[in-house]
Image (cartoon, coloured by chain):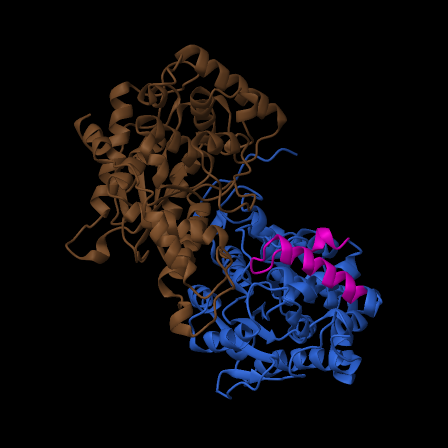
Chain colours: A brown, B blue
């Protein structure tokens, strides 16, 4: 709990007074004022977060965290539980969607086991910070103990901290972090978290996940109702929500957000599961919101409501619903482009271009 | 006219029977079916266009074409006309928005003068295919002669052809082409073209361009009305529309689309001006539509109507209104990512991942 509280205490409020200076710089670049729209907003946000007028996003890292869910045995997913493990190996072998897209944008993928249901083979590029062998079936009992919930958050913090500025070189410091998830049945946990925290109804917050049919969707909603009724999570206590209806990878991702914010590193939030983790982080410390960039509008039902609650607008809208951080890495590429606009474009003066006729 | 007709005649209908095979391949990759949404659609489109099951988009080229507009002297832009020339030099020096973003996604920028109002200094990376020294003031007379309109289209074709497969190596062949524009007052021409071709009213099709105020916007609409009334362009004759209310860079871009389609190269359409060029290309040969990818939803009023007319959905929505091809290069990066999903991801079999439980 000490690590968690220390990390939260280190998170500073973002200072919006940086914006004026950044906008002035943007307005001196060879383009009509404001004509790069959201790219300009992103550049301002990165300056605000990093408190660096000329940020560089060279070291992009996507944290893909995995965990299993006891509730999977209720048949709420289209895939069997062993797929969590199989996909972790796929990430490590470099063959998954996240690997392809991360390579495309020049991001590193950090794969971590927060609670997969079996012992994974140790290997150099896998971080094992297992809290337990999958959560318990939340439709019958709490998914995890309060201690385990805290442990998952602190493990997420540790994973970020161990990768951030891992040696004394500037280049080992993470410039922008992305979030990704893997865990069969984790949309069920994410829906439950989102229902409890946002207050939205179960139907509006429950989608088809990996692609379940109508009868499974009906069952999934019943299971979520049963989980909430049985556990009565307390919305204002994020650790209670995480413990009762969450998941280890969701806790890990929430912890990673807290750690990134405490180090003034922008965090790109992937889709529905990552946004549920963002809800946990936000409830623990609302200042985290200003460090978050929503990558994309997921197909998963309820995602928009979660983003509205957080006050975030998604950058991309590609009908994605894969998770793993696939939307987040694509968005990281766009954020990088936005920052380069700020740092690499010529000014009207340096390029000898006439400015617009400005009226008083 | 011969070159134009030959190019149009070479454009083949895209064969959608490729989609089934591509979707089957996508469905064997380690992800839930359809979970990469629009990325999967883009991958299918590129296969359809290129008729290559394993396309690679290594050679990305953005064609940024410049031209001046006689109508600028009516005061329809926030910037003075000399900015067209100044910005061309800025492109050549590598300091403009398009240069920064093209470098970010690994695209080359080809800068071409289709009709800037002065003689530009010759230099290695500038293509001079000037039709004339700016168009005439379309609010009083036709912007150009019919011969000039054809010449601008054919110059655009030549520009593409000279860059495409410029030597015998495969790597010199353009894998994906993007469109960008530069020309003070060219939103005025683009609005006029779009009004005539789509049949929409002037108010709904006229925006603030580089950022004009209310009184200039009112004037701009009056000028567009005057141009259409004076010239009476015939909507079903795209060359007539281009001649009467168009621009040389718009004709060049329309020609470049035709050339790219004739060589089965996907074309990424930038914002409002590029979309007006796409309207011209589409009216000359409707088959071109299937080769087009709309990069983004521009802030410029009327863009959505133009895209609806073309049946295109914009990929990004970043409130951009810079032109130059800035939205197009960002979109090219996404299309590249989509194609890599198809060609670089592991299959369920190769990765040893279980498939979903499929019902009959």
B64 vs A74, nearest the viewer: B64
B348 vs B317, nearest the viewer: B317
Residue at image coords 51%, 29%: A305
Q: Which residues are magenta?
A: B201-228
Residue B8 is situated, as x and y percent measured from the top left of the image, at 76, 74
Q: Magenta region's main secondary structure?
A: helix
B58 vs B324, nearest the viewer: B324
Query: On the rendered image, what quadrant is the N terminus of chain A found in?
Result: top left
Residue A235 is situated, as x and y percent measured from the top left of the image, at 39, 18
Q: Is residue A109 left or right of residue A270?
A: left
Residue A72's image quarter? top left
Q: Is residue A252 visible?
A: yes
Residue extending farthest to the bottom is: B122
Is residue B211 inside the magenta stretch? yes
**Count of labels shown?**
0
Residue extending farthest to the left is: A168
Vertical comparison of B9 with A257: above or below: below
Residue at image coords 34%, 41%: A291
Q: Is residue B319 left or right of residue A311?
A: right
Residue B49's image quarter? bottom right
Is residue A133 inside the magenta stretch? no
Residue A221 is situated, as x and y percent measured from the top left of the image, at 54, 20
Residue B263 is situated, as x and y percent measured from the top left of the image, at 66, 74
């Amino acid at each position: 709990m000490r690590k968690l509280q220390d990390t939260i205490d280190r998170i500073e409020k973002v200072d919006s007074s940086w914006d004026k200076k950044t906008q002035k710089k943007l307005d001196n670049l060879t383009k009509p004022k404001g004509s790069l729209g959201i790219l300009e907003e992103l550049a301002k946000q990165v300056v605000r977060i990093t408190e660096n007028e000329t940020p560089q996003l060279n070291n992009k890292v996507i944290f893909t965290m995995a965990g299993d869910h006891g509730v999977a045995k209720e048949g709420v997913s289209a895939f069997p539980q062993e797929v969590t493990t199989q996909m972790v190996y796929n990430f490590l072998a470099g063959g998954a969607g996240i690997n392809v897209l991360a390579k495309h944008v020049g991001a590193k993928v950090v794969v971590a086991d927060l609670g997969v249901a079996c012992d994974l083979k140790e290997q150099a590029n896998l971080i094992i910070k297992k809290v337990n062998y999958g959560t318990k079936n939340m439709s019958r009992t709490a998914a995890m103990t309060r201690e385990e919930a805290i442990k998952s958050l602190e493990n997420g913090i540790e994973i970020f901290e161990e990768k951030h500025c891992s040696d004394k070189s500037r280049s080992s410091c993470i410039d922008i972090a992305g979030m990704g998830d893997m865990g069969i049945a984790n949309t069920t946990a994410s829906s439950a978290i989102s229902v409890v925290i946002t207050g939205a109804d179960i139907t509006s917050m429950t989608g088809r996940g990996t692609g379940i049919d109508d009868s499974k969707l009906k069952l999934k909603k019943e299971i979520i109702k049963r989980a909430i009724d049985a556990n009565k999570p307390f919305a204002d206590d994020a650790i209670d929500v995480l413990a009762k209806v969450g998941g280890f990878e969701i806790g890990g991702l929430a912890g990673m957000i807290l750690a990134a914010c405490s180090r003034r590193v922008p965090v790109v939030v992937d889709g529905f599961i990552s946004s549920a983790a963002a809800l946990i982080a936000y409830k623990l410390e609302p200042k985290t919101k200003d460090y978050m960039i929503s990558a994309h509008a997921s197909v998963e039902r309820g995602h928009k409501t979660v983003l509205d609650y957080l006050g975030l607008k998604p950058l991309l809208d590609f009908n994605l619903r894969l998770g793993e951080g696939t939307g987040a890495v694509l968005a990281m590429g766009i954020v990088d482009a936005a920052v380069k606009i700020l740092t690499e474009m010529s000014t009207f003066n340096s390029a000898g271009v006439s400015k617009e006729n400005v009226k008083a």
